[in-house]
């Protein structure tokens, strides 16, 4: 094979021709003949037994040319990429085929390539970093969460109150006609949870065990079951049992039950420390993300659409996999939201563009800083991954190519250079407000 006419084009694409000589062309033709002869009927021959020359005589000598081009295209493209050191991205396209009167074949390709990147400022960048400030109220709220997780649910002989669990039977009807899915027995409903139609739970409040009543509600206009959306309904409800959650006292005994500490003061101090660490980690992550975003905005690159679409594809696969872990799939999820795949891809695209910029940035910083990764570094990373996923070393090595591990290590070290040189600043008031919702302590 010979590569000719390599030309750079706009939007980081490259076109080139690959000439396959007569021997390569002939081999490809024979390969597709052997693959397809079983599908071709020729009178006088058993199916699949007709000689190639007979088939070509009937249908023309070029009968297998197009299939031969398809057969050769992957190998021709791979050869050209290696021969010309082309860093292609996305899926290449065959733009034309010239069969050269049957003596040789020329395939014309166009492919997106890794763009040329010019770095801007990436050291000494300023970005807001939220201060660590855990309040007594946040500590109290965390303790209250733990109390609720350790509460006991007990039956009470009184009317149901907000926050209680009412065990109910119910049957709903619209215009006096029961509807599918509107009936249940022994359902445990936490009053105030908002898990039922608006107005339903409020009307269960006040019911005692053994009492019944009709509840009038109206389904939301955007209700997922279109036949019920916006319609008035009546639910006949019977309360079988009322339960309340009794919380443990906040004392030393509570601390001993839920932690390794002997006193509430010690446990409270540990909760505060964990909240402070969570805040610090969140602030650092926000600071680092802002630095990467700034440095990414400072690069200059003609990013090909194929790179962004490839990243969108990856995001769609990740989203679908995450949903499948919960017994769902993306198609059903989008249908439930009233959205189609094109709309979902459009939503993903801004994040995909940001990810591509980050990838280009870190790759170029690694090059500019001459970051090196040794075989020992790669081996150590394989060891960490094996431990993380609980599998043996050979399994990890078989699943993750060495080049991927090397590229990841280079990117992380490039990011560390940006982080180390970053300058934290005071966040604006609105940014401080956004940091108010912090991760809970473990």
Image (cartoon, helix red, strand yellow):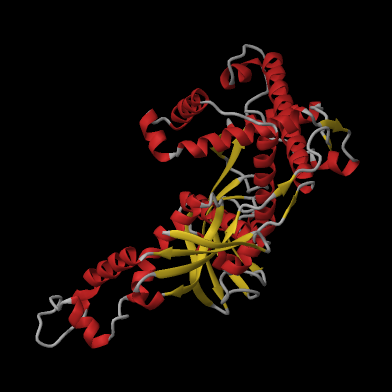
Q: Is residue 439 left or right of residue 324?
A: right
| Camera-side residue of 440 and 217 | 440
- The residue closer to the viewer here, 369 or 335, is 369
In this rendering, does residue 140 appear at all?
Answer: no
Q: Residue furthest top?
A: 262
Q: Position of residue 292 (x, y in %)?
A: 74, 40
Q: Left or right: where does residue 422 sit relative to residue 160? A: right
Residue 217 at x, y percent in the picture: 65, 68
Q: What residue is rendered at 39% in x and 64% in y? A: 20
Judged left or right of residue 8, residue 132 is right
Front residue of 36/265: it is 36
Q: Residue at x 74, y 25 (%)?
A: 276
Q: Is residue 314 above or below residue 270?
A: below
Q: Residue at x 83, y 36 (%)?
A: 125
User: 165 above or below 107?
Assistant: above
* Residue at the (9%, 86%) spot, across then down: 44
For the C terminus, which image quadrant?
top right
**Residue 9 versus residue 274: which sits nearer the camera?**
9
Q: How many marks?
A: 0
Q: Position of residue 133 (x, y in %)?
A: 82, 27
Examine the rendering and report whether any part of residue 410 can be seen: yes
The answer to whether 121 appears left or right of 57 in the picture is right
From the top left corner, tell me how far across and down residue 432 is, in percent.
85, 38
> Looking at the rendering, in which quadrant would you find the N terminus?
bottom left
Residue 143 position by quadrant: top right
């Amino acid at each position: 094979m010979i590569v000719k006419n390599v030309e750079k084009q706009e939007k980081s694409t490259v076109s080139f021709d690959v000439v396959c000589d007569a021997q390569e062309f002939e081999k490809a033709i024979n390969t597709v003949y052997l693959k397809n002869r079983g599908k071709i009927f020729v009178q006088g021959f058993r199916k699949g037994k007709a000689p190639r020359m007979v088939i070509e005589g009937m249908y023309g000598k070029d009968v297998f040319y197009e299939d031969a081009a398809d057969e050769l295209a992957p190998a021709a493209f791979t050869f050209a990429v290696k021969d010309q050191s082309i860093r292609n991205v996305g899926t290449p396209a065959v733009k034309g085929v010239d069969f050269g009167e049957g003596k040789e074949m020329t395939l014309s390709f166009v492919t997106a390539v890794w763009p040329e990147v010019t770095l801007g400022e990436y050291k000494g960048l300023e970005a807001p970093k939220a201060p660590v400030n855990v309040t007594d109220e946040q500590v109290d709220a965390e303790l209250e969460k733990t109390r609720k997780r350790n509460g006991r649910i007990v039956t009470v002989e009184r009317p149901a109150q907000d926050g209680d669990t009412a065990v109910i039977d119910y049957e709903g009807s619209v215009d006096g006609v029961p509807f599918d899915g509107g009936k249940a027995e022994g359902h445990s409903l936490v009053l105030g949870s908002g898990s039922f139609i608006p107005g339903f739970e409020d009307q269960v409040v006040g019911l005692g065990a053994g009492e019944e009543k009709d509840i009038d509600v109206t389904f939301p206009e955007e209700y997922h079951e279109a036949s019920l959306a916006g319609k008035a309904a009546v639910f006949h409800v019977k309360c079988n049992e009322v339960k309340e959650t009794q919380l443990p006292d906040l004392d030393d005994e509570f601390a001993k039950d839920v932690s390794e500490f002997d006193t509430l003061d010690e446990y409270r101090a540990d909760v505060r420390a964990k909240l402070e660490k969570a805040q610090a980690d969140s602030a650092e992550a926000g600071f680092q993300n802002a630095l990467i975003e700034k440095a990414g905005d400072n690069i200059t690159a003609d990013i090909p659409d194929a790179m962004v679409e490839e990243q969108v594809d990856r995001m769609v696969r990740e989203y679908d996999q995450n949903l499948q872990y919960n017994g769902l799939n993306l198609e059903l999820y989008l249908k439930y939201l009233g959205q189609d795949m094109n709309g979902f891809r459009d939503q993903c695209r801004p994040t995909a563009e940001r990810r591509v910029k980050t990838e280009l940035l870190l790759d170029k910083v690694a090059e500019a800083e001459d970051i090196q990764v040794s075989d020992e570094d790669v081996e150590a990373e394989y060891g960490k991954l094996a431990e993380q996923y609980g599998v043996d070393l050979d399994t990890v090595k078989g699943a993750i190519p060495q080049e991927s591990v090397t590229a990841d290590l280079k990117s992380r070290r490039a990011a560390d250079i940006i982080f180390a040189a970053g300058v934290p600043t005071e966040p604006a008031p609105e940014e401080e407000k956004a940091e108010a919702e912090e991760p809970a302590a473990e």
